[in-house]
Amino acid sequence: MHHKPLFIIFLLSLLAFSSCYSQKNQQYYSSSKKAIKLYENAIDLMKIGKPERAEETLKLAIAKDPNFIDAFMVLGDIYSSKKNDEAALGYYKKALSINESYYPKLLYMTAEREMSIEKFGDAAVHLRSYLQSENFDNTLHDKVLHDIDICDFASELMKHPVAFNPTNLGENINSEFDEYVNSLNTENKMMIFTVKHPSDMNSGQRSLVEDFFFANKDESDKWKFRQMLGKKFNSVNDEGAMVISPDGRLIVFASNRSENFGRFDLFYSVKNGDSWSDPVNMGEGVNSAYWESQPSISSDGKTIYFVSNRKGGFGGSDIYKVTLNENGTYGNLTNLGSKINTSKNEMTPFIHPDGQSLYFVSNGHLGMGGTDIFYSKLDANGGFSDPINIGYPINSKDNEMGILIDSKGTLAYISSDKYGGKGGFDIYNFELYKEARPTPVTYSKGIAFDKETHVNLKVSFDLIDLKTGKIWIHSTSDPTTGEFIFCIPQGQNFALNTYLEGYLFYSENFKIDIIKPADKPFIKNVPMSKIKVGESIVLENVFFASNSFNLNPESNVELEKVFNLLTNNPSLKVQIAGFTDNVGSPNDNKILSENRAKVVYNFLVNKGISTKNLSFIGYGEQSPIDSNDNEEGRQKNRRTEMKVTAF
């Protein structure tokens, strides 16, 4: 059997750890010559690669002397090498029960086995006993203290388990091979994942390669059978991880290709209409001679988070980010800093479409022993909060692989080999408990087109937080189809402005208090009006206090857009018109509407727009655009318009 030498090397390394009791011709914890002879025969059998016979011989030695500690310890080593931690623990504890001080390091070995089966309380007791023992190995001092911290922390997590009920995604997604979830689209209807599978299923060749697959949901919200992505994305070498941007027009992935700077580099591809561009290496501003992989894209598509083990980090693999430059390249490489990264490994970052919730795995932050899942929130200053362990039993003694969360913030996806499944690592989903959820996000989609010709247009658009004035998303619609899609966090007030040279900008307001289902997004088609005399637009994001002509601060965002339009088109002349609903007297409404229009006029004049290019008028309750019989209609009738009077 070709694997036996490796097994022996590993097993003998374990025995070397216990060398003080595995060598012949030493003082044993037995006076039985027959037991000692059998024990020494077992050691010889181990050395020639016959662990099964050695195990039988050790049990015979114990039958001759039931208190033969050395035999119990070596049996524990044998079962440890087989990953049978329960059995190993039984033999170690039996040895300790006979004489705990005979070989103090056995306390540490016992604790290691207890940690491996999540008996953290018992492990902490044995570790503390070892720390106080007379023959403590000082080279293990820091390791023992760290393990005690892990045990204490993990014990607390296990006292307060979080809700966790993983569901296997089924045979349309999972197979006997390994599947690793990579990315979901904004609509939660398409998933990209990596599959480790035979390079040639038909030839019987069993060498494994990693390729990208995808799957879509059907009308009943069930996953269709998976499909492999084409050769444009799957090379003859291994692929790492892939992510699709929230607008569905950018893919970033890791691959091992001939043009790489290192073993794995990041590549990107852009969608135009129904086709994807050839992948392009992201260049030296992103990639290095080291390993780059596991990308995640921010909600605006302008920031990419990824993992690298390059020099200059905090140690191991760190999480970095790069941002999109004005020239279309990515740069400004930034390490996420010591709150996120440690001297060990941080991996699989996932930035949720809410733009502020980061999830990742780490074995450097305090957890349950392996790589645990953590989450952190982005603050107003652009820094991240202290990471929070997502809890037990989502995290366990094993290495977790990372997590994805849908745009609604409720359904999480993981890859695991712990819950039965189809074989190897499978993809599961589960409802994420409330405290660990990101801000719910819904989305809007539509098409930008010429109002008269209905030709699809590539427009630029800004989604702006009206409270802060921060541009949440700056992007463009598809050059061929005019399509766009963007995420909108729940409970915030946003302005949408779309613009294109030669056209009036388009204005819309979003305040989302409910999360719409994936099959019912906010449809917002954008008819763009060319700049010509008589055309007008409603300034949807100009707001006044009730029954007042005092501008709300949120109006500044939209008025800056008007200012830019007039500045960029010096020959453009416009009229600012105010309108009200029919509540109150017609005369009062006319005065109010005129005062509101004048306030907008004054804002623009004070910004430097010539009075020759501006006029204002108040129409009061004249020219309603909706019914005044309900509040929704009256709200639409209370508006400010901008009309082209000369160009």
Image (spheres, helix red, strand yellow):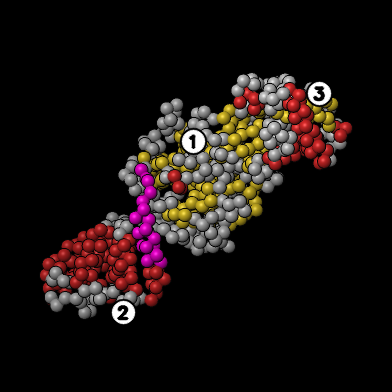
**Dot 2 or dot 3, earlier in sequence:** 2
Three-letter residue code for mark 1:
Asn
Q: Dot 3: within a 10 Å radius of its alpha carbon, few (fewer than 14), some, or many (20 or more) residues? A: some
The Cα–Cα distance between marks 2 and 3, rounded to whole angstroms, is 94 Å
Residue nearest the observer in this picture, 466 or 311: 466
Residue at 64% x, 27% y: name it.
Answer: 635
**Dot 1 or dot 3, earlier in sequence:** 1
Q: Is residue 212 visible?
A: no
The Cα–Cα distance between marks 2 and 1, rounded to whole angstroms, is 59 Å
Residue 476: which quarter of the image? top right
* The residue stretch that appears in magenta: 146-165
Residue 148 picture location, percent across and down = 37, 66
**Dot 2 or dot 1, earlier in sequence:** 2
Three-letter residue code for mark 2:
Glu
Left or right of 452? Residue 65 is left
Residue at 16% x, 74% y: name it.
Answer: 36
Residue nearest the observer in this picture, 413 or 177: 413
Q: Which residue is mark 1?
A: 188
Q: Main secondary structure of the magenta part?
A: helix
Residue 592 picture location, percent across and down = 75, 30
